[in-house]
Amino acid sequence: MKLCYAVGALAIVLAATLGFLRQRNQDAETRALTQARALAADVAARRPHPELAFAAVVGEPPASKYPFLRKRRWLLHPEAARVGRAVDDKDAHDLVAQAQRAGEVARFADDGTLTLALRAGGATAIVRLRPPGGKQPLPWGWLLLAIGLGGALAAAGRGRALAGAAGLALCAAICATMVAGPGSARLLVGLAALPGLALCWAHARGALAGLGRHGFAYAYVTPAGLGLLVLVLVPFAVGCVLGFFDHARGRYTFVGFGNFREILGSAEFYATLAVTIAWTAVNVLLHVAIGLALALALREPWVRLRGLFRVLLILPWAVPNYITALLWKGMFHQQYGAINTILSACGLARVSWFSGFVPAFAANVVTNTWLGFPFMMVVCLGALQSIPREVYEAAAVDGAGSVARFFRITLPLLRPALVPAVIIGSIWTFNQFNIIYLVSEGKPGGSTDILITEAYRWAFERGERYGLAAAYGLIIFLVLFAFCMLATRKRRAAEVT
Amino acid sequence: MIQALVLLQTVVLWHSYRAQEKVAIEQLAAQWNALPDVPRLELLAVPYDALADKITAAVPRGHGPDLFIFAHDRIGDWAESKILEPIEFFVDEPLCDRFLRKTIDALAYGDSLYGLPLAYKSTALFYNKALIARPPATTAELYEIGRRLTDRRAGRFGLVYENTRLYFHAPFLHGYGGEVFDPQGRLHVTTPEAVRALAYARLLGGPDGIVPPETSGILLATLFNEGKAAMVVAGPWFVGEVRPGLSYGVVPLPVVSETGRRAAPFLGVEAVLMSARARDKTAAFRVMEFLTSDAAALLRARVARQPVANQAAYRDGRVLRDPILAAFRQQLDWTRTMPGTPEMRMAWSPYDMALVQVVAFGGAPEPALREAEQKIQAYLRGAGR
Amino acid sequence: MAGHLFLSAATFLTLLPVLLVVRKAFTPGHAFAADLGLHVRDLTLVHFRQVLSAPHVGRQALNSLAVAAATTVIGVFLACTAAYAFARFRFPGRRAGLTAFLVVQMFPATLLTIPIYVILDHLHLLNRLSGLVLVYATTAIPFCVWMLKGYFETIPRDLEDAARIDGASRLGVFVRIVLPLSRPALAVTALFSFMTAWNEFILAETFLSREDAYTLPVVLAQYVGQRTTEWGHFAAGALLTALPVMVLFYALQKHLVAGLTAGGVKG
């Protein structure tokens, strides 16, 4: 709950900051542009402007048999020297070439210098203005205040929806003020925030006291948490924000929930989601079943060469999976693949693995199972050690059979170590990109694609729609989040009983 | 002593060349670095998979190279997102005349020039000389010869090519007069010509066909090397895959019997491109000029058997006598330049899907093409084009 | 007997694809067949020779080893402390923290390459092995925390309480009692952390821009071209890369199966 608030608050702050920056910069840019346009028109009319950093007027470029070849001789044109200082400048050359096509091109350099090229009649004028005084800096103070207040309030919320909502509203209001800006609004927001602040203070006192009491625990958790915060949470926030933008031709535009509408509005999404869920369920089930079976078998006292078996069985995990995934793909080949060779040797029909959804899905699952069971086996091997042999001995005395022992002793006692592995394994499988991408390649017709491969295709094969891909990422996140909440809730219930 | 104090800038170049091509570029770098008064050239070999993403990530943040080598088909994307530097400022007509016209034209995007060509890559027809005395000149002959050499039960096939990929289907598509985008850049997929090309691909890949199902690059090499594929459609990269000792020839792809036009594969041009954030653009351009000089091209052609982009190389006896380079040079005249636009990059996978639909499942060509066209159109709309 | 049969069958199925890789590594040429023909004609070591004689390869192996070892040490250490706190203490934010460790796994990493690139850039850790270690350790920590927490919870509390009464400090209890008892789980997490770093190439090839800074998976990725792959080199390289993992696992497995000692449990 708290996390929801914190993430929400962070997202709002980031989105608002972006909006704010854009607006501020736009203001400065528009002013500079207007000034430059007037000057360029002047220059085009051959009125001298020696005070300009750079000014030139250019005729039609000389023709060439190569359409892209425009000679740079024009930059040294005597006319150019008359209207301003002319230099042999590549950027200016490129800009003029563009302006001759597009009519007007403006470019802001990193230092704020504006160069504007303008086509007027047969000639093209180019002017360069020095920085108009720089762009507005990032309002760090306001930003930190917003983040701090939002975070504190969200933390203070502690399940109390009202306080959390107040925190979020405050954040939103502060951010809105940053963008909109009039002083009176700021005052209003400050007043509105007072009750929230009071609430916050009360809780903060409690929290501070708690911090002292639980210092040891916090000291243990903080280092790992810090790393995650920087390297996972921040990129995650960036991804979230990106989900609300659309990318085209190297530019991002804010589209609100447009990406989500597009995804959730297409029937294909639900089919892909169903495939993804089936993919995850089948794989995790097989991983755990095979891994557990092997781990149990390896524990039996009659097994000889245990060490050798164990080492051989983790090979699929050890060999880089790029090569083995492609190898499996080859083994599923209709004519030459090993699988069909075996099938036909057994008198069974050859299967065209990638021409139907079911066989293609099966091929993916087989590959991923092969790759994934060693990990589960190792986890189970470790987890099994937490069950003392005495428990079994006691059960044997009680006369319990091996099946009963498995279900009544082994499985319940394995739970604490196994459940996290299953949950995390599910998350990984849900986002398992390589296997789908390399083995079935989504065939036939994209039907075996899962959400993550779909997201990848939007980002890299269907026109660099990074925003849409990020929205996919966010949806994947929400689905998994819901799943984990359910799984851990059940688990807590089980712990109580 | 004083000269030693003159600090010369280094020029960093990223490439993903392997094997002999890597040897050639390293030799060239060594030659350059031995010249007096030049900025040092530093090479970095990057995995091919990573190169494009690395460029996209690194260049805007100033960590990219000054120069890099890549195929021309990403130029559109990179020019629009300001990753590439237009270089026509440095270029004059004599320099352009150095190259085969098609190869330098491929590097222009929106009236600007974005690189100098190193080599071109297209497919051609490889054939096993032990199985085929005279390679086919027409598609009808191709099918006929192929039928004779196909024995499905024994796993022998007349022709092997990746028939569910547009890149390898393109020669037939163009030979039949079809296209993906018209010269004005408009989507032009569902045409009678494209339908006929697909029907031919279905004939080749169908039950009476001469092409095995589910062909991949791995399978192609294996079958050709085992003598189970009499002919394959592949590019210059395939030369390194052929088992030493196998006697094979390379010829241009055949004439399409129905239209009398040459099957025209896509042309890809490998070029040295300049990053928009190159530190010293003049120095970087000097390196570009050096790597694409006639002498350098000759070295690349000899060491790596690269189909180089320089005209002069093909007047050199040693290059002329190389049957493979000669074949690819001939094929060049019958190629269609792959559009270097972002639009083209959205067309591949829907078109591939149509090919699977028709070639693998025996579907009707027209609806499959229509579906592909709608998909591409949807992607174009989505990307705001 | 049935058990042995089951284990042998499983091992056979497991090994089959690996054997194909082995076959490729020892046969000349770069074409890669996925059929079952195990007729091996001309064996060769040429791929291994070429892989091992590439420039920088020794340095690159060291890089891999250093990155994986550092990831393992840092990842396991941080995960241990955090997991212990989660398992033993009740403190405000415990549940949220635990959930956070899960949640961070959920946003697909495939889409995060560029944001992580930007962050490493700001931290000046781009193109450095330490940057990779940081990323890998944070990738590995969530699983390690959950795994260890689950295991710590199975260790009877009485043991620790007894030690505390005997005058041991909190840290002393953790180091001298809890950790030794958790050897199996530590072995699992160590292996997992090591593997996370050892086989990763997408981030490594994006972040590293110096040939002598490459890790082995990046070298392997170099064998894959646009249209052709040097399968011979790749197979040989993959086997060489897998070797240290096998050695590590062999070394770890006695800890993996080191159960709670009877005496310890009864306390």
Image: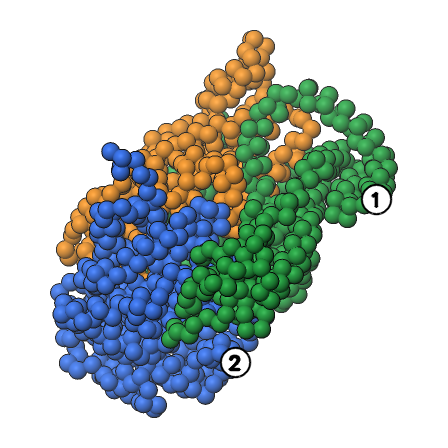
Give the residue at x 33% y 79%.
Answer: B264
Discs 2 and 1 share one subunit:
no
- On residue A185, the disc is 1
Give me the chain that's green: A
The count of marks equals 2
Q: Residue at x 38, y 85 (%)?
A: B176
Front in this rendered view, residue A141 or A96:
A96
Image spot of residue C6 (x, y percent):
36, 47
Is residue A199 in view from this perspective? yes
Colouring scheme, one of rainbow, by chain, secondary structure, one colour:
by chain
- Name the one closer to the observer, A90 or A102: A90
The quadrant where residue B15 appears: bottom left
Q: Which residue is mark 2?
A: B370
Q: Is residue C7 above or below residue B51?
A: above
Q: Position of residue C32 (x, y in %)?
A: 27, 59
- A287 relative to A57, above or below: above
Is residue C195 toward the left or the right of residue B249 in the image?
Answer: right
The amino acid type found where label 1 is placed reads Ala
Q: Colour of chain B?
A: blue
- Chain C drawn in what color? orange
Give me the disc on residue A353.
none
Residue A272 relative to residue B108: left or right: right
Q: Quadrant of the C terminus of chain B?
A: bottom right
State the CA–CA distance, disc 2 to disc 1. 56 Å
From the viewer's perspective, tell me whether residue A41 is left or right of residue B317. right
Q: Residue at x 17, y 48 (%)?
A: C45
Chain identity of mark 1: A
Quarter of the rendering occupied by the N terminus of chain B: top left
Q: Position of residue C142 (x, y in %)?
A: 54, 37
